[in-house]
Image (cartoon, rainbow, N blue to C red):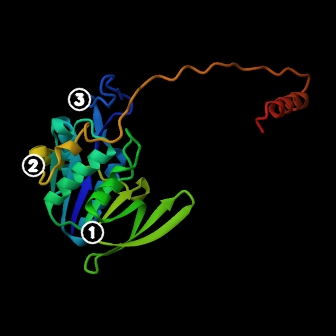
Amino acid sequence: MKIIVCLKQVPDTSDVRIDPETHTLIREGIPSIINPFDMYAIEEALRLKEKFGGKVTALTLGPPQSLKALTEAVAMGADEAIQLSDRAFAGSDSWATSYTLALAIRKLGEFDLVLCGKQAIDGDTGQVGPGIASQLGIAQLTYVFKIVNLDPEARLITVERLLEEGREIVEARLPALLTVLKDINQPRTASFIKIRDASKKNIPTWSAADLPGVDPAMLGLKGSPTQVIQIFTPPMRTGGAQLIEAGTVRESAALLADKIIAEKII
């Protein structure tokens, strides 16, 4: 099987900053990690390779420092990795990101599965995975927490999705794209030897010029249909607490109930 994992390097949640001019996240020079949900996508891809054989390719779009995320994916067991990095990609929203990743996937050739985390913890949109599937014209299976059955020869996959109202079992034809939840597995820890070997691996970087059929007008900030117009800090809430004084707890409870009803809270 040929499996592609799309991962994202995100700022450490304790150190997120916004560029006041472009209104986009500042990524250069900021301590970063692999998006936690993408770790489960990497692990599931590796488990499928161990079961069915094949090849796992890690793919990311980001600044030069995102190479570290790919090195970590290789240390976990990915066979190869591709970095998409170009000033032309800067400021991409979820649509432009999906477009760019889909072009790279097409360049990689035939594949069976694309795996993504359910969402990135910096943007929290959950749109890139479905956007890639839409660009590629393949089935999208989102919020997957279990692969029930996978038959590469019949070109069929059955998954169980976790929804707010319950669970859903869905079947689709390959190739397909899955966005996975953290319930699906427990990511492995790379050994020291694999980390050392991964650090020596030559990971190619593709620019916009390396993507066949690319439309420059659809890349980066200029190609993003959604943009942040303004950023601001919400004003501090005003208000205070009122102490209800009464002779007994029962009297206090009665007074509190009267105030709640008077304020139409319930």
Instruction: Specify the quadrant that holds the C terminus.
Output: top right
Q: Which residue is drawn at 83% across and 34% down?
A: 261
Q: Which of marks 1 and 3 is in front?
A: 1
Q: Which of marks 2 and 1 is nearer the N terminus?
A: 1
Q: Which of marks 3 and 2 is in front?
A: 2
Q: Which residue is drawn at 18% across and 68% down?
A: 54
Visible residue check, residue 209: yes
Q: Earlier in the sequence, mark 3 or mark 2?
A: 3
Label 3: element kind: loop
Q: Earlier in the sequence, mark 1 or mark 3?
A: 3
For residue 28, the mark is: 3
The residue to which callout 2 is attached is 210
- Label 1 CA crowd tier, 10 Å (few <14, some 14–19, many 20+): many
| Amino acid on which disc 2 is placed | Asp
Visible residue check, residue 193: no
**Can you tell which quarter of the image residue 10 is in?**
top left
**Can you tell which quarter of the image residue 154 is in?**
bottom left
Q: Which residue is drawn at 44% across and 56% down?
A: 183
In 3D space, how far apart are the residues under numbered discs 2 and 1 (Cα atoms)? Answer: 24 Å
Q: Do the residues labelled 1 and 3 touch (CB within 8 Å)?
A: no
| Amino acid on which disc 3 is placed | Glu
